[in-house]
Image: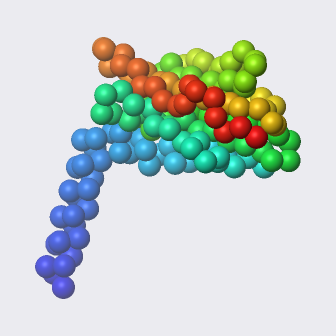
Amino acid sequence: MIKSVAKVVAMTALAAGVLAANPAYTAYAASAAYTPEGVCGAGFSRVQDGTRPLKSGRDTFGHVYLMYNRSTGYNCVVTIKSAFYRTATYTTATLKVDGEKPKTDAGKFKYYAGPVKAKARGKCVAYWGSTRDTRLDFAEATGGRRTLGNCG
């Protein structure tokens, strides 16, 4: 019994050390409070090929999501950060409907950019997002699909 308690204490300390040494892990857990469904609102659901990571080299700073509301014909894009969470960093969410100019929400946000909504029933869309880190190099992570797809 004492050995198993000591083992649990040691594993808990190890996990705490990993989380403290890697703030991106704790940020990811904290960012789970925001979902694309919650940000876009009632009736929106994720579409096929509608989740893309925001990558800077091998690092992932978040995800950009494409959502659709069947009853209204609207698409919604939101970029949710998983790195540099709770820190206002330049973050964008963009939605492009075929034949229209792109719509973008951009600024220094702590948690997410968006929602960006546009009526797109019967049209193809493209979507993308970005965020920057807070280090001296200000690396930018980008993701999405800039070619038109998800037509319908």
Residue 50 appears in the rendering: yes
The percent coordinates of residue 2 (x first, y second) are 16, 81
Residue 73's image quarter? top right
Residue 41 appears in the rendering: no
Q: Quadrant of the C terminus?
A: top right
The percent coordinates of residue 150 (x first, y second) are 66, 39
Q: Residue furthest left?
A: 3
Q: Is residue 60 left or right of residue 113?
A: left
Q: Please determine whether, in this image, residue 126 is positioned above or below residue 42.
A: above
In front: 108, or 41?
41
Q: Residue furthest right?
A: 72
Q: Quadrant of the N terminus?
A: bottom left
Total labels drawn: 0
In front: 51, or 105?
51
The percent coordinates of residue 106 (x first, y second) are 60, 18
Q: Residue at x 59, y 42 (%)?
A: 50
Q: Residue at x 38, y 45 (%)?
A: 26
Please name the colour scheme applied to the rendered image.
Answer: rainbow
In front: 3, or 51?
51
Q: Residue at x 23, y 49 (%)?
A: 17
In front: 74, or 15?
74
Q: Residue at x 45, y 32 (%)?
A: 54
Q: Please determine whether, in this image, residue 44 is positioned above or below residue 125.
A: below
Q: Is residue 39 left or right of residue 27?
A: right
Q: Is residue 142 left or right of residue 3?
A: right
The percent coordinates of residue 116 (x first, y second) are 70, 28
